[in-house]
Image (cartoon, helix red, strand yellow):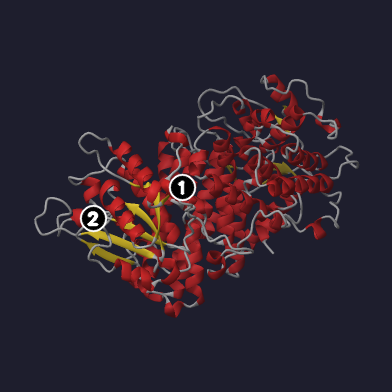
């Protein structure tokens, strides 16, 4: 009966409100330490704190400069047993500390409006003060009273249900209490939403939040163009399109990661997968695959054996639903499960055909004159547009898998930058629509693990904040399955693109930058850098065997003499290679930005910053040079034939970081720049035509 009942607001025709950070004011009620460790300690306070912090971070990115953020603090008389003045219990949670322009309201009663200037302040904000978004404590007292009072005063009241907490009271557990309060308020006084529903204002072609803060605002709208088709489809892919020949050698394995060795003769990938008992026992040879008549298993088999490193193939079908993925490329294991979800207009086969065609067209030693990667790619884009226009994708997992296939296809086109960026923005919108809870397990979690590196690396490239830098997106998707080493690394650096964006804004007008904000930003980058260094040291200490080692290779010259080459760095497996090359790239990024801040604000180096006390700024060049050499020396390992597409594609971000560091400095280290160029040429020879534009840029 209760499930079918209509709310009072529905009966009188009051529609639920939507919320953006630009059309409303956030009111944080009593988020004080009393509720964390005082007599009024609330249940699940850690979860509600994280949600409040995440909402606050969203509002701090609004176009109002903090003016639409209100911190309400409850104040009691001296000596009171709760919120005791002069003690930590009366203070707001540390992570919520107010910034300049954010309003602080002190209250003595449950209602935030009672004998305070809150109403006057909201009135002064104009339209943005007419809608109030409530978070905080306690649900049945101050939150409920404030919501009811706000409704009586004519405000459009919204309560964020996952950012509101309470304690157990006599006879009623906290969870039940919060649930009843939320339903009571939603019935007559307010709109109840979750924190993931708070968005930008949705204006087109660009939301106000992005337009007014100088950010691009685009993504997947049905009438948009995803790639520069006029240039791509007028310029056919030349005969130079090449990719490494597919070879594989699955090793016997136990619980540890497999070990890669210098290249040697191996069996074919197809035979290897078959010998390991994979689902693809009846594949036709891929070189003779007719895509027009190909079945689902053939397409999956081609993608898997061309993308996953050979030492990882034995593990791909051996992973339970909630276990940790070994490498980010294991998203392909969800493909067989999606067959049962296919419908008449399913876009995934089109996307996989586009990827398969590109792979086949880049396979050396075969005549593929009848294959047109452009045609299949364009067909997949058309199918994607139709699905978007329908505004009701049959399966988010299918949708995400299709975009992943198209993103990989982009890597084999020479003009991929715009298309790849559009796909990444589309996935970002998909993530926002679903919320982090949806990516905790199952196919969506595995697809999230696969796409997350693309999204964070794109944020570094564009120097724009990413939703993946928020606590909820760092913690919730990995609350069931623990993150791999690579994703543990991304957890540490996902916030860095936000810092890069802040540095760019400071660089535009250094004279008007708040010194305290500059100092805070410098300290944050130092903490990230020190954290990366400590984590790298910890990895090496905890490992039973070396994490990497030098490998000197010899080759015969034409006259038969042996020639010794520079030592390459070798790794026990592709995971370690990716982790360390990306650690080094992120360290270079942090040091480069710290150096930039020190040049913009020379007074920083006079402070007691841990970085400058340990290393003077002139040492940064030495460190970045050493790390860059290590990155370049690691590329040989990742470009082995056995690494398939996954290994070579993993080189893009570290290479880009090294190249742009020394290119921008006008460095004398021309040998490093030359090494980057040589490596990129080899990537192109392997079929990754996108390498020059991704690594070198425009």
Tell me the residue that label 2 is attached to: 110
Q: Is residue 340 visible?
A: yes
**x, y percentage for residue 154?**
38, 62
**Relative to 200, residue 373 above or below:** above
* Residue in the image at 56% along x and 23% along y: 253
Identify the residue at image location x=63%, y=51%: 426
Number of marks present in the image shown: 2
Residue 588 is labelled as none
Image coordinates for residue 380, horizontal then vertical, percent: 77, 45
In the displayed structure image, the side of residue 17 where residue 317 appears, left or right: right
SS at badge 2: loop
Disc 1 secondary structure class: helix
Q: Residues within 10 Å of mark 2 (few under 14, many from 20)?
A: some
In the image, 519 versus 696, the foreground residue is 519
Give the residue at the far bottom of this rendering. 511
When asked about the image quadrant of residue 511, the answer is: bottom left
632 relative to 558 in the view: left or right: left
* Image quarter of the C terminus: bottom right
Q: Is residue 260 left or right of residue 198?
A: right
How far apart are the two marked residues, 1 and 2, measured between alpha carbons?
Answer: 29 Å
**Residue reaching furthest to the front:** 12
Of labels 1 and 2, the one closer to you: 1
- 623 or 330, which lies in front? 330
Q: Nearer the viewer, residue 357 or 193?
A: 193
Residue projecting furthest to the left: 79
Q: Position of residue 363 (x, y in %)?
A: 80, 39
Please give the residue where the numbered disc 1 appears in the rendered image. 11
């Amino acid at each position: 009966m209760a499930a079918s009942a209509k709310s009072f607001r529905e009966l009188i025709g009051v529609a639920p409100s939507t919320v953006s950070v630009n059309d409303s004011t956030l009111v944080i009620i009593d988020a004080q330490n009393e509720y964390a460790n005082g007599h009024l300690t609330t249940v699940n306070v850690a979860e509600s704190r994280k949600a409040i912090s995440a909402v606050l971070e969203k509002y701090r990115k609004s176009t109002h400069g903090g003016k639409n953020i209100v911190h309400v603090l409850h104040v009691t008389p001296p000596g009171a047993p709760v919120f005791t003045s002069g003690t930590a219990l009366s203070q707001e949670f540390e992570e919520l500390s107010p910034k300049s322009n954010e309003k602080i309201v002190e209250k003595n009663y449950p209602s935030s409006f009672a004998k305070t200037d809150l109403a006057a302040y909201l009135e002064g904000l104009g339209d943005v003060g007419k809608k109030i978004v409530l978070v905080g404590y306690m649900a049945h007292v101050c939150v409920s009273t404030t919501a009811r009072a706000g409704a009586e005063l004519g405000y459009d009241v919204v309560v964020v249900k996952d950012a509101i907490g309470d304690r157990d009271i006599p006879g009623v557990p906290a969870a039940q209490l919060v649930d009843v309060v939320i339903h009571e308020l939603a019935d007559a006084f307010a709109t109840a939403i979750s924190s993931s529903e708070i968005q930008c204002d949705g204006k087109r072609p660009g939301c106000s939040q992005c337009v007014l803060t100088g950010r691009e605002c685009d993504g997947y709208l049905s009438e948009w163009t995803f790639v520069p088709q006029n240039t791509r489809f007028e310029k056919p892919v030349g005969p130079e399109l090449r990719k490494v020949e597919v070879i594989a050698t699955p090793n016997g394995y136990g619980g540890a990661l497999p070990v890669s060795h210098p290249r040697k003769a191996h069996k074919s990938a197809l035979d290897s997968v078959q010998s390991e008992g994979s689902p693809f026992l009846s594949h036709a040879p891929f070189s003779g695959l007719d895509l027009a008549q190909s079945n689902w298993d053939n397409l999956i088999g081609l993608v898997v054996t061309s993308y996953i490193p050979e030492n990882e193939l034995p593990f791909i079908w051996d992973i339970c639903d909630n276990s940790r993925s070994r490498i980010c490329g294991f998203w392909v294991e969800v493909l067989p499960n999606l067959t049962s979800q296919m419908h008449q207009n399913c876009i995934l086969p089109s996307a996989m055909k586009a990827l398969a065609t590109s792979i086949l067209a880049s396979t050396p030693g075969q005549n593929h004159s009848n294959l047109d990667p452009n045609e299949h790619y364009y067909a997949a884009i058309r199918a994607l547009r139709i699905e978007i226009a329908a505004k009701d994708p049959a399966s988010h997992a299918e949708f995400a898998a299709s975009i992943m296939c198209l993103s990989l296809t982009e890597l084999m086109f020479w003009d991929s930058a715009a298309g790849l960026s559009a796909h990444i923005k589309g996935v970002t919108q998909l993530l926002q629509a679903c919320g982090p809870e949806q990516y905790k397990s199952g196919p969506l979690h595995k697809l999230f693990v696969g796409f997350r590196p693309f999204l964070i690396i794109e944020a570094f490239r564009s120097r724009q904040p990413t939703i993946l830098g928020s606590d909820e997106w760092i913690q919730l998707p990995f609350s069931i399955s623990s993150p791999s080493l690579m994703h543990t690394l991304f957890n540490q650096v996902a916030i860095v693109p936000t810092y890069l964006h802040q540095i760019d804004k400071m660089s535009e007008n250094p004279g008007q930058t708040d010194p305290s904000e500059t100092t805070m930003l410098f300290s944050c980058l130092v903490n990230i850098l020190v954290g990366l260094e400590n984590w790298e040291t910890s990895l090496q200490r905890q490992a039973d065997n070396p994490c990497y080692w030098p490998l000197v290779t010899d080759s015969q010259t034409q006259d038969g003499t042996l020639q010794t080459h520079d030592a390459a760095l070798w790794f026990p497996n592709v995971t370690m290679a990716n982790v360390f090359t990306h650690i080094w790239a992120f360290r270079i990024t942090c040091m480069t930005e710290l150096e930039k801040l020190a040049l913009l604000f020379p007074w920083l180096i006079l402070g007691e910053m841990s970085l400058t006390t340990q290393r003077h700024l002139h040492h940064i060049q030495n460190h970045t040079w050493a790390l860059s050499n290590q990155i370049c020396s690691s590329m040989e390992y990742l470009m082995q034939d056995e690494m398939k597409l996954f290994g070579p594609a993993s080189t893009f971000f570290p290479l880009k970081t090294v190249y742009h560091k020394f290119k921008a400095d006008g460095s004398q280290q021309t040998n490093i720049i030359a090494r980057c160029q040589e490596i990129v040429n080899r990537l192109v020879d392997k079929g990754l035509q996108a390498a020059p534009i991704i690594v070198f840029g425009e």
